[in-house]
Image: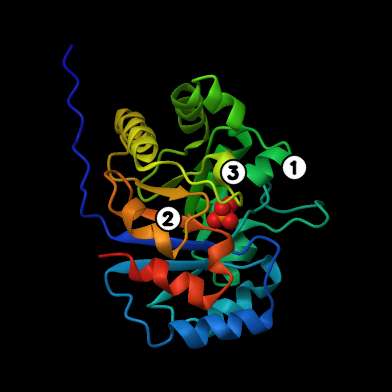
Amino acid sequence: MICWLKPRDENMKKLIVGNWKMNGSAALLHDMIMGLVDFNVKNVDVVICPPYPYITMAAAMMCADKISVGAQDCSIHESGAYTGEVSVEMLRDCGAKYVIVGHSERRQYHNETNEMVKQKAMLVFASGMTPIICVGETQSEKESGQTLSVIEKQVRESVFVAPGVVVAYEPIWAIGTGLVATVDDVKTVHAHIATVLGSMGLSDTKILYGGSVKGSNASEILETENVQGVLVGGASLRIDDFVPIIDAVK
Ligand code: PGA
């Protein structure tokens, strides 16, 4: 049987997402807004994901048409007796437009499974926000040649099939380590993710790369086939580091 897969549109608008993790302050938010206010972001979507307490402030201060605000996680529950958790409805009320789900730090420190990630992505989507669904292999999985099979399983099991969802490939060994996947690695893994997503009917899904992205490597990564943006951790914490990454979008 011949299976026809819709080709991907390589001209999708790029997406740059800053994940502050448990860093930042009201002062950093102020600096970011000052730094981005006059910035020309017409050919790129920029999202800042600060910790929960700053989301409302960030959404009120960011020019909504230029910079969006996202959350780094959400509860798997819609509401109820879940002390300390934050629901998707609350995030939407606070002005979040995107929610990162399944970041490797959530998978590692909070034992989040693919099924849980998919459930969260579904709730995010159902509340009218965009889930950014993270996948990535460990160092040992990479060394034992399992990268593509691990990633494929994560994509098939974690991605909620719906228009507009975003997938982020973040090799765990490259997060916060200064190690960056080679362009060939990024190309191979992203091509595989694109094929898997295509077979799930998600040919228009943006695929971001994340892991030690900085101004000096951003353009090479952003120009790689099947890369529609980047998810940035450390380098999103200083305006002087973040702006060159946005600038790298051609
Ligand atoms: P990093 O983090 O850019 O500091 O490596 C990326 C991420 O964890 O999203």
Q: Is residue 6 left or right of residue 46?
A: left
Image point (49%, 20%), residue name: 145
Q: Do the residues labelled 1 and 3 touch (CB within 8 Å)?
A: no
Query: Which element carries disc 1, helix, strand or loop?
Result: helix
| Residue furthest top in the image | 1
Query: Does any atom of ligand 1 lie closer than 8 Å to the CB of label 2?
Result: no
- Image quadrant, ligand 1: bottom right
Q: Residues within 10 Å of mark 2 (few under 14, many from 20)?
A: many
Query: Which element carries disc 2, helix, strand or loop?
Result: strand
Residue bearing the label numbered 3: 102
Q: Is residue 41 above or below residue 98?
A: below
> CA–CA distance between discs 1 and 2?
23 Å
> CA–CA distance between discs 2 and 3?
16 Å
Query: Which element carries disc 3, helix, strand or loop?
Result: loop
Image coords of residue 45 (percent x, y): 37, 67
Q: Earlier in the sequence, mark 2 or mark 3?
A: 3
Residue bearing the label numbered 2: 230
Image coords of residue 204 (percent x, y): 28, 45
Q: Nearer the viewer, mark 2 or mark 3?
A: 2
Which amino acid, mark 1? Tyr
Q: Which mark is residue 130?
A: none
Q: Is residue 84 above or below residue 239?
A: above
> CA–CA distance between discs 1 and 3?
11 Å
Which amino acid, mark 3? Gly
Image coords of residue 122 (percent x, y): 52, 44
Image coords of residue 30 (percent x, y): 59, 85
Which amino acid, mark 2? Val
Quarter occupied by residue 243: bottom left
Residue bearing the label numbered 1: 109
Q: Quadrant of the C terminus?
A: bottom left
Q: Nearer the viewer, mark 1 or mark 3?
A: 1
Q: In which quarter of the image is the N terminus?
A: top left
